Amino acid sequence: MDVLLRIRRSNPASNEAPRWDEFVADLEPADRVLDALRYVKWYLDGTLTFRSSCAQGICGSDGMRINGRNRLACKTLLRDVRQPITIEPMYGLQVIKDLVVDMKPFFGQYRSILPYLVNSDPAPEKERLQSQAQREIFDDSTKCILCACCTTSCPSYWANGAYVGPMAIVQAHRFLFDSRDQATERRLAIMSQPDGVWRCRTIFNCTEACPRGIEITRRIDEVRRALSFGMPRVVKDR
C-alpha cells in the first residue's frame, strides 16, 4: 500500500522556518510508523532526523506526535492510523532537528526526584524482602520507560516547563510506595513544592498517551493523598 506521510521539518540551527514535507512510502498495513520513517530516510530523504533504538517499545526513544497524539513510532501500526499520517516532534521540549527534541530538561526533572532506592540499613545476606501486597502498590509505576510521551502531552507542562511533570511524579511514586525505601520525607518535600504534584490539573492526557498503559493520573492522585493524609499502612509497615 502507498502511505502518505506529512512530516514537520525544522532545523533551528539554520534559522529556517518550520515546514511540512510530504512523502509517499510503499509499505504493508502491518508495518509501523517507524518503518515508514526509515523508508523515507533510507530511500527518499537522508536528511530526515529522528530517534530510534530497540524498535520494540522498550527503550522509549522514538516518542513523537502521530496524528495529534503522543505515541511510540515503533508501536503504532500503519493500519491503525488514518492518512495522511501527520508526524511532529513532541510539544514542550525544544526541537533540535525535525523530530528530535532536547531531552535534557526532561531528564533533569527525572533526577530531581531521587530516582533510586535509598536505604541505609546494613545490606542483607540475600535481598531486602517485602510482601506481595507491598510490591503490588507500586508495581504499575515500575513500567515507565522514560519516553516522555506523558509529560509532553500535558498542557500544564506546556504552560510551565518548571513543572516536574507526570513522568517524574510516577517515578517518585515508584520509590515513595516502595516499602524498602527510606527517603519518603525527602521525596514528599519535593512533590509538595510549587512546581510539584499540585500543578497537575487531572486532564488525563498523560494516561492516554502512556504506551505502557500506566494509570498515571491515578498514581499522581495517590501521591497527593500521601501528602494530604500520610502513607498507606501497607507501606508504613516496613
Image: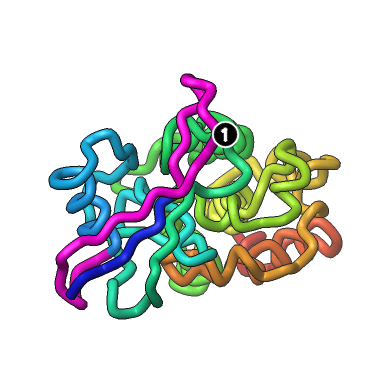
In the rendered image, residue 12, in percent from the top left (x then y), is placed at 52, 26
Q: Is residue 58 magenta?
A: no
Can you tell which quarter of the image residue 212 is in? bottom left
Camera sees residue 204: yes
In the rendered image, residue 206, in percent from the top left (x then y), is placed at 60, 63
Numbered range of the magenta stretch: 8-32
| Picture colour scheme | rainbow
At mark 1, the secondary structure is loop
Q: Quadrant of the N terminus?
A: bottom left
Tell me which amino acid carries mark 1.
Gln
Nearer to me, 48 or 71: 48
In the rendered image, residue 132, in percent from the top left (x then y), is placed at 44, 72
**Relative to 98, is 74 above or below?**
below
Nearer to me, 11 or 238: 11
**Relative to 111, is 237 above or below?**
below
Instruction: Report whether 50 appears left or right of 131.
Output: left
How many numbered marks, from 0 up?
1
Camera sees residue 111: no
Instruction: Report whether 110 appears left or right of 77.
Output: right
Quickly name the residue at label 1: 94
Q: Residue at x 78, y 41 (%)?
A: 189
Q: Quadrant of the C terminus?
A: bottom right
Task: For label 1, count other residues whose C-alpha is less than 10 Å away and answer few (under 14), some (14-19) or many (20+).
Answer: some
In the rendered image, residue 140, in percent from the top left (x then y), is placed at 48, 67
Can you tell which quarter of the image residue 98 is in? top left
Q: Residue at x 70, y 66 (%)?
A: 222
Nearer to me, 93 or 78: 78
Q: Residue at x 71, y 59 (%)?
A: 223
Instruction: Report whether 93 appears left or right of 193.
Output: left
Q: Is residue 9 magenta?
A: yes
Nearer to me, 32 or 229: 32
